[in-house]
Amino acid sequence: MQVIMAENAGFCYGVDRAVKKVYKELDNHPLYTYGPIIHNRQVVEALEKKGVTIIHSIEELDQHEPGTIIIRSHGIPKQDYEEIEKRGYTIVDATCPYVKRIHQIVAKCKGNGNILIIGNKDHPEVRGILGWCDNQAMVVQTTEEIDRLHLPKDEPLGIVVQTTFNRMNYKKLIEKIQKKGYDVDIYDTICSATEEIQTEAYKLAQQVDKMIVIGGKHSSNTQKLFNICQSQCENTYHIETLDDLELNVFNEDDIIGITAGASTPKNIIEEVYINVRNTARI
Ligand code: SF4
């Protein structure tokens, strides 16, 4: 059995930065995160044990004693910053700089034509972006939605894309939009970290018999990684931790690939890697 670990598996720059910011603030009480700091249950539970409380909404802020609150890497709408500050909380902003850049772009485009966000309208990152252009943007993620677009051709159309959007799908959507003859201003805001993880996972999945994707069940980037790997390797397993993995599915002559979503901590990845490798030696 051969086990190949993807080089780019695990925490991306923005997630690493956000989690480090929380750990740096642990001496401050009370300490909150606005939403789970990342989509990884194990990391969130470890922080809760250290006294970090998750606040899920603006309304919930009123139920707590004001303290330090950390904004997660996905970012939040502009109005939420104002609401948080109004209630006396101190903000530590861990919004990923790549997401911040999108906020700045849509804020600049606002009032100058239309704005189109390519992404999932229910994802917190997209909801945050909408809040930087007064919710005046349209959100699309399928070619059918592009077909249904009817926008004035004499007004500029600023286009941004969710950082974790799949590049191949993005290209298809952009081609469709361009064919409609709008006056487009395209900002390719897909994050290179996501792309690197996805491209490497795509190639690795082609070379192996079985593929393991580690990451939170609610993590959109892990889900995408799983879909990419499964498209190339039908024996792809999505697990959160080693506990979810049936080690007896692996055969002696299998080549196994391992990758992990951008919100998966190193210790979980290493534990899976070590155990799969040890299985190989039995
Ligand atoms: S995936 Fe990219 S944009 Fe998202 S947090 Fe990580 S580095 Fe930032």
Image: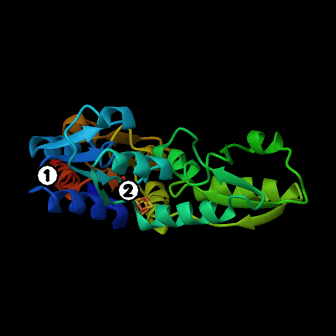
Q: Residues within 10 Å of mark 2 (few under 14, many from 20)?
A: many
Asked whether, in this view, residue 217 is left or right of residue 129, the answer is left
Can you give x and y, in whole percent of width and height, for residue 30 in the image? 14, 46
Can you give x and y, in whole percent of width and height, for residue 60 in the image? 32, 33
Q: Which residue carries the number 1 mark?
A: 278
Q: For the N terminus, which image quadrant?
A: bottom left
Q: Which residue carries the number 2 mark?
A: 73
Q: Amino acid at mark 2?
A: Ser
The label on residue 14 is none
Asked whether, in this view, residue 125 is left or right of residue 4, the answer is right
Q: Secondary structure at mark 1?
A: helix
Ligand 1 quadrant in view = bottom left
**Residue pictured at 67% horizontal, 47% vertical:** 136
Ligand 1 within 8 angstroms of badge 2 C-beta: yes
Q: Amino acid at mark 1?
A: Asn
Return the residue nearer the eye: 96 or 57: 57
Q: Secondary structure at mark 2?
A: loop
Q: Residue 181 falls in which quadrant of the image?
A: bottom right
